[in-house]
């Protein structure tokens, strides 16, 4: 136990330092609608599009994150019937000709601005753990965001593994995967203590310590803001099912049976802790009136993939080592690995299919085709156990309109409440 600092006010000692920990229970996860629709990655340049095709019309495909373009997009998203918006947490981008994700609105500003201009949709922000940001600061900021939004906040927890970002914070990293998730576990437990306690709290963890800490106001959400996580490894899934409420998954080869198996596994893991989770999937959308028109766009985009930006992404995410380009362990979602000699390989050592999947959606499930095809694909995902989709578009303004005018009416006509 660390020594109590002089002048610290008395606090109730936190007995639990790791999850599962849900003071007051979990947020309500039951939904009247079949599927929760979220707009994703609107707050970073180019979103999930690592293709030089974005340079054909930068205002629409690359710079939609800028205010007031983003404000218009968020209002349209709410009007279209989406349930939430989810910000992509970024501290540095991936360069290349497109300067992929180099510009971004931060997690607090983006959430607060979103709350101020909308009335109904969920305001889902993203925070990274491991950069030694004090739990009290994060708890105070997120509680204030939740207050400003009237209780609409959700918090996406990311166990950061980007060495460039650690260096920006003056740290050497990333730590091992085990340590990163241990930090995440302790931080989330600290947040839950601070979000729920009406009295000052003492917290004596391995990674975080505070004495007499308290926030006021507490979150408007009851019992607390929804917690979201993306994980694929066993360590990540263990953390997420013990502490979070919504969990983003992927499956090998984007196989629907794989999604169903993964969803069943996660529900079983959560049940062992007496908890429930909502299964979510990240999706990248390119659609048009016909499959042929959509295919024409996707082929053009594939031909324009920004290889240099992808190489930076693969390096910073741990797939390619800076010095030797050697094979490394699985990434956050358990995707394919980069092999030695990747800098000479046109597909950076990960194969053509995975390379193109990263360039067009960062490995997300691809919804490509006509409005009817996209509607069918969403139904397939839902029937495989996916209850929430985070949609990212090549052209977000157009994509939100297409969902509103074409896809949602088709889904409703087929009996799905959305």
Image: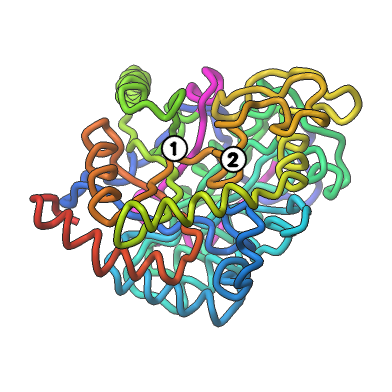
Q: Position of residue 395 (x, y in %)?
A: 49, 65
**Residue 407 or residue 23, whichever sits in front:** 407
Q: Position of residue 404 (x, y in %)?
A: 27, 67
Question: In front of the other: label 1 or label 2?
Answer: 2
Mark carried by residue 248: 1
The crowding category of the residue bearing disc 1, from other C-alpha atoms within 10 Å (few below 14, some 14 to 19, many at least 20), is many
Evaluate whether residue 208 shows in this view: no
Q: Position of residue 274 (x, y in %)?
A: 31, 24
In the image, farthest residue toward the right: 323
Element type at mark 1: strand
Taking 28 as reference, is 300 above or below it?
Answer: below
Evaluate whether residue 237 shows in this view: yes
The quarter of the rendered structure image containing the N terminus is top right
The answer to whether residue 4 is magenta is no
Q: Position of residue 321 (x, y in %)?
A: 82, 27
Taking 75 as reference, is 418 above or below it?
Answer: above
Q: Is residue 202 left or right of residue 226?
A: right
- Quarter of the image for residue 175 reads top right
**Residue 246 or residue 206, whichever sits in front:** 246
- Residues in magenta, as a range: 210-239
**Which residue shows up at 47% across the image and 77% down it?**
116
The answer to whether residue 217 is magenta is yes
Among the two numbered marks 1 and 2 on one chain, the one whose residue lies closer to the N terminus: 1
**Which residue position holds label 2?**
358
């Amino acid at each position: 136990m660390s020594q109590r600092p002089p002048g610290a006010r008395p606090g109730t000692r936190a007995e639990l330092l790791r999850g599962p920990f849900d003071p007051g229970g979990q947020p309500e996860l039951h939904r009247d609608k079949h599927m929760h629709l979220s707009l994703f990655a609107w707050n970073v340049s180019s979103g999930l599009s690592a293709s030089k095709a974005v340079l054909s019309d930068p205002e629409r495909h690359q710079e939609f994150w800028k205010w007031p373009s983003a404000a218009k997009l968020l209002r349209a998203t709410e009007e279209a019937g989406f349930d939430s918006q989810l910000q992509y947490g970024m501290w540095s981008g991936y360069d290349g000709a497109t300067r992929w994700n180099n510009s971004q609105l931060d997690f607090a500003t983006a959430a607060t601005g979103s709350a101020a201009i909308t009335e109904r949709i969920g305001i889902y922000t993203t925070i990274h753990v491991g950069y030694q940001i004090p739990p009290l600061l994060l708890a105070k900021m997120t509680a204030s965001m939740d207050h400003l939004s009237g209780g609409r906040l959700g918090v996406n927890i990311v166990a950061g593994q980007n060495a460039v970002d650690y260096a920006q914070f003056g740290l050497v990293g990333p730590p091992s995967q085990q340590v990163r998730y241990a930090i995440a576990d302790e931080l989330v437990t600290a947040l839950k203590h601070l979000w729920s306690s009406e009295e000052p709290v003492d917290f004596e963890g391995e990674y975080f310590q505070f004495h007499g800490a308290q926030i006021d106001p507490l979150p408007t959400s009851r019992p607390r803001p929804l917690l979201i996580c993306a994980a694929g490894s066993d360590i990540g899934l263990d953390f997420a099912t013990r502490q979070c409420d919504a969990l983003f998954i992927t499956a090998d080869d984007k196989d629907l049976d794989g999604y169903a198996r993964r969803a069943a596994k996660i529900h079983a893991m959560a049940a062992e802790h007496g908890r429930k989770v909502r299964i979510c999937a990240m999706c990248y959308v390119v659609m048009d009136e016909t499959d042929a028109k959509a295919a024409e766009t996707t082929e053009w985009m594939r031909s324009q993939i920004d290889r240099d930006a992808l190489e930076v992404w693969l390096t910073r995410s741990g797939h390619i080592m800076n010095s030797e380009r050697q094979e490394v362990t699985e990434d956050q979602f358990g995707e394919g690995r980069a092999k030695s000699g990747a800098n000479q390989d046109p597909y950076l050592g990960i194969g053509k299919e995975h390379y193109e999947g990263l360039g067009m959606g960062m490995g997300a499930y691809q919804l490509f085709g006509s409005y009817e095809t996209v509607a069918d694909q969403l139904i397939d995902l839902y029937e495989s156990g996916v209850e929430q989709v985070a949609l990212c578009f090549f052209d977000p303004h157009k994509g939100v309109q297409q969902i509103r005018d074409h896809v949602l009416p088709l889904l409703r006509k087929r009996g799905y409440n959305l």
